[in-house]
Image (cartoon, helix red, strand yellow):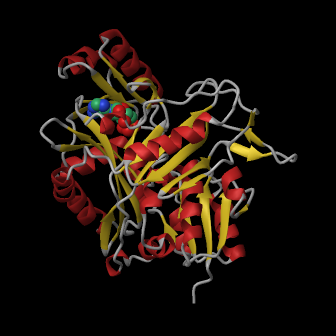
Amino acid sequence: MESGTVLIVGSGGREHAIALGLLEGETFTDLHCAPGNAGTSLIASNHEVNFTDAEGIVELAKEIGASLVVVGPEMPLVMGLADLLRNESIPCFGPQKDGAMLEGSKLHAKKVMESIGVPTGRFEIVDDLSNIEKHLDSFEPPWVIKRDILAGGKGVTVTSSRIEARDALTRAVESDGFVLIEENLSGEEASVLVFIDESGYVMLPASQDHKRVGEGDKGPNTGGMGAYAPAPVATPSVLSRTREEIVEPMHHYLRNLESPYRGCLYVGLMIDNEGSPNVIEFNVRLGDPEAQVTIPLFESDLGTVLLSVAKGRISEMEVDFSEMHASTVVLASEGYPGDVLSGREVIGWESRIEEGQVIGFTHLAGAKISNEGKLVSTGGRVLSATGIATSLRDALDASYQIIEGIQLEGSHYRKDIGFRALSA
Ligand code: AMP
Ligand code: GLY
């Protein structure tokens, strides 16, 4: 008999979305988070265990009698949290170390793709400063330079300036010993989250994240400034090619790992003008903020689905999604994505919309509830305003109605989330 107790690891808007999704279902009635955030504190028990403290998480899971641990961020997975949990026979949604290397090392991911023929940009390894010009000559600008480190999207430089490219290559080789230079892929990006285990997989509705801080997808990369789903750029034909050319071979590869992959494979796609999908990156977890717009589209009980994956039985489940549209707009602290100013009160975050088929509410992220019961910013991405409706336009209207009513000194948000879909 399952205990009905679940532990969610992480502290972002994604983890709030997972907790809300589980709350809607019947599989888990006792929700715990480590460490969680202000949002999860309202619906679950938060525990002061850092998500990088793998032993602490395992102890906590045992103490509360968790029958499932859902791991939000990549870091604990790369560090081997899932390995420790499975040693204790605790089901875990999230791959073990060998699978998590797909995100832990971009070079590893490239080699896997190359060996099984998954479409991705050509790359070279740069490890000798005297060959930099030769490497730059062998790619057309803009140059894409990727450090082989976990950097939350910030280890990548895309530039048409040869001086900047040379500089990025030099700095990376000096600090890491080597760096990847990669063919620039053009087109439109989309994220396809795939719940996958050795028995099968389920592709979630495709979403699109806006990674750049500024409107028109300009400016520095961030963790994500907003997202929506489904993303129309992922047409039925793109999705069927993604399944055949990427997901099927990856499933074959992952199910044959020493420890079969059980969790989410995040496929970051670049879709070119002809509708050909190419992989930009793999992540080994749900995206943030992609989770905030895909989890609300589950019609099936999320808890049962996550538990099935953690037990290697996803093929036994029929997983259904609604026909609704979802959007989320991130409210970021002053300074984000650079050094942020936090510790400021957030006002107006509780407002909700429930009008006919339109729902609007906030997913909380870098924020805590103070002793006086006020919401106070603690990080870069403070919250996101999520809308769900029968059309993307209505979902976005709900997101913006909510976010326009929120006050946080110095904060900023993008006013053009979803623009590619709306102008399509
Ligand atoms: P990554 O950390 O690999 O996701 O890269 C961060 C962002 O850099 C991606 O979301 C893209 O916007 C951009 N990027 C990465 N690789 C490429 C590429 N080969 N071609 C064009 N843009 C890229
Ligand atoms: N939103 C991008 C990511 O989660 O990696």
Whether residue 1 sits left or right of residue 389 in the image: it is: right
Q: Nearer the viewer, residue 73 or 52?
A: 73
Task: Name the residue at the top extreme.
Answer: 163
Q: Residue at x 45, y 54 (%)?
A: 286
Q: Is residue 65 above or below residue 336?
A: below
Task: Name the residue at the left extreme.
Answer: 274
Q: Residue at x 36, y 48 (%)?
A: 207
**Residue 157, picture quadrant:** top left
Q: Nearer the viewer, residue 292 or 258?
A: 292
Q: Residue at x 76, y 33 (%)?
A: 343
Task: Name the residue at the front extreme.
Answer: 356
**Residue 36 appearing in the image:** no
Quadrant of ligand 1 in image: top left
Whether residue 20 sits left or right of residue 250 in the image: it is: right
Task: Name the residue at the right extreme.
Answer: 372
Q: Quadrant of the C terminus?
A: top left
Whether residue 160 sits left or right of residue 411 in the image: it is: left
| Residue 16 x %, y % | 60, 55
| Residue 41 x %, y % | 72, 57
Q: Nearer the viewer, residue 276 or 92?
A: 276
Whether residue 252 sits left or right of residue 146 in the image: it is: left
**Residue 409 appearing in the image:** yes
Q: Quadrant of the N terminus?
A: bottom right
Q: Nearer the viewer, residue 270 or 350?
A: 350
**Residue 275, picture quadrant:** top left
| Residue 128 x %, y % | 32, 23
| Residue 215 x %, y % | 43, 25
Number of numbered discs on residues? 0
